[in-house]
Image (cartoon, grey):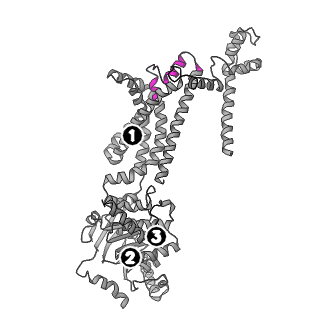
Amino acid sequence: MKSLLAVLTVLSVIIGLWYAACVPMNIKGVLDQAERGGEVVEPATPKARRDASAIGLIVKNTFVISRSWSVERPRLPAPHQVLDELWGTTVEKKITSKRSLIYHGQVTLSATLLGFAIGTGLGILLAVGIVHSKVMDMSVMPWAIVSQTIPIIALAPMIIVVLYSIGVQGILPKAIIAAYLSFFPVVVGMVKGLRSPDGMQLDLLRTYHASTNQGFWKLRLPSSLPYLFASLKIAIAASLVGAIVGELPTGAVAGFGARLLAGSYYGQTVQIWSALFAAAILAALLVFILGLLERLILKRMGV
Amino acid sequence: MNMQTSPETASDGTASMSPVIAARDLDLTFQTNDGPVHALKGVSLDINKGDFVSFIGPSGCGKTTFLRCIAALETPTAGQLTVNNMSPDEARRNRAYGYVFQAAGLYPWRTIAKNIKLPLEIMGYSKAEQDRRVEEALELVELSGFGGKFPWQLSGGMQQRASIARALSFDADILLMDEPFGALDEIVRDHLNEQLLQLWARTEKTIGFVTHSIPEAVYLSTKIVVMSPRPGRITDVIDSPLPKERPLDIRDSPEFIEIAHRVREGLRAGHEHD
């Protein structure tokens, strides 16, 4: 009960700040419109208002404050406008409609999941190699780290162009960009996890004259699962970011990335914000599902 | 006198056989950043079949290192060491011994029964044989009925018993124990000592047992090896005159107190060398 109160307090503070921020962000537009509608505003001309401070304009025209939360094309949309748009483009639109966020979400989600699967598989394979081979540890790990220092936004167009030139297009380029972001946390977590059994545990297997293979399946792999799940949560969120970034440079027609791009072309801030929120909700949902899976599996393992 | 003959008659049947574990002039030097550390120097010892040998001494005297050499977890830098007339590493490959560590080290994701199965799975026993041996091992350590529990559901003493069962499950002739009860409280420890003696009497295994505790060493052993540090070496080997049958209150008998005294003297003598 107490924690619920704390959560609600934080939430209401954020929403309160957001509404407050809408006023100075949108005040000039609101005043322009009021002036065109024949109302008396202070100062009277757009030119005079242009260099005035937002706070000053608010103080002089307090009667328009409430209107800054319902501007048609706001600089910063109010929370209820974003919610309205989210509701309208998910529940009230048919899934087949190009304006449905569910439709766009599903496009991004499929690239995210495919990328996540590729990234996780690759990450685990690399980690197994790194743990078992000193040469791989020294030769692969530095490149894995270097790969993450390159901004994905710079790399994504190149990946798409290169893949397009060899005839690969559609979901795969996006998935590869998603995989590029998601394999790294899996490698790092899995290497740590596979190395987590202590000397005593390894000695014990040695006294049984166990093979490396048996040591892997019976000790290292089960020991690594808690680490793997922590990594998977990071990886799936990174994978979603990768899929969205992958949708930007192609001017893709579908997906959250396409919605963001279209929104910024046409100054549709409400559309941008609602796409952002939809992406955040999707990421939260994916992480939550992984969390459930983690609890279920680790509980069955008694860890 | 009768007391002393019982271990001897036990080895009479195998009189023609050489010791199960034989060490001659064993040296082990670790190279560290602070220079060489002489973990073992000139260690010679014979352990016969059915012996219960305790290694006692202060930290750094090499008692654990010696046990690890027998288990082929460390390699001596000089001297000869044979286990079942083989090199320690061959003996390890032949699964000649079960090893019990200070921590139980049970896998948290396996039940007690599955934990005991671990060595059996690795050694390729059939499913039916695995189940039979798990039951047998659980019974030996008085944990029958706990096979389905997970380690966290058991007390520390029970976990350590489960780890002993795991070391016994593949029925190696030698049991090596490295301070197995070191982390347990006095009362649990007494109880486990009693159980261990019964188990030893039933299975007739050769046991190597590392400990810090004088009463524990005297109570359990047929042979007490007193060691001292820098360099790690043996300062005294005491063949215990105590009978094989040992109730807990034997610890108040004059014989017991006398041996304990000799062990203490040996430990003190080791320190005077410093």
Where does the image place residue A227, in percent across and percent down from the top left?
Answer: 46, 46
Q: Nearer the viewer, residue B17 or B21?
A: B17
List the residue tagged with mark 2.
B200
Give the crowd class for mark 2: few <14, some 14-19, many >=20 residues within 10 Å: some
Chain letter behind tag 3? B
Judging from the image, mark 2 belongs to the subunit labelled B
* Picture quadrant of residue A51: top right
Question: Which residue does the numbered mark 1 point to in the structure image?
Answer: A123
Q: Answer whether residue A255 is magenta in the image.
A: yes
Q: Find residue A166 and report its horizontal and vertical position in percent.
A: 31, 23
Relative height, residue A214 to residue A104 (above, below): below
Q: Secondary structure at mark 3?
A: loop
Does label 1 lie on the same chain as label 2? no
- Amino acid carrying label 3: it is Phe
Q: Quadrant of the N terminus of chain A?
A: top right
In x, y percent, where is residue A292?
A: 51, 43
Identify residue for label 3.
B181
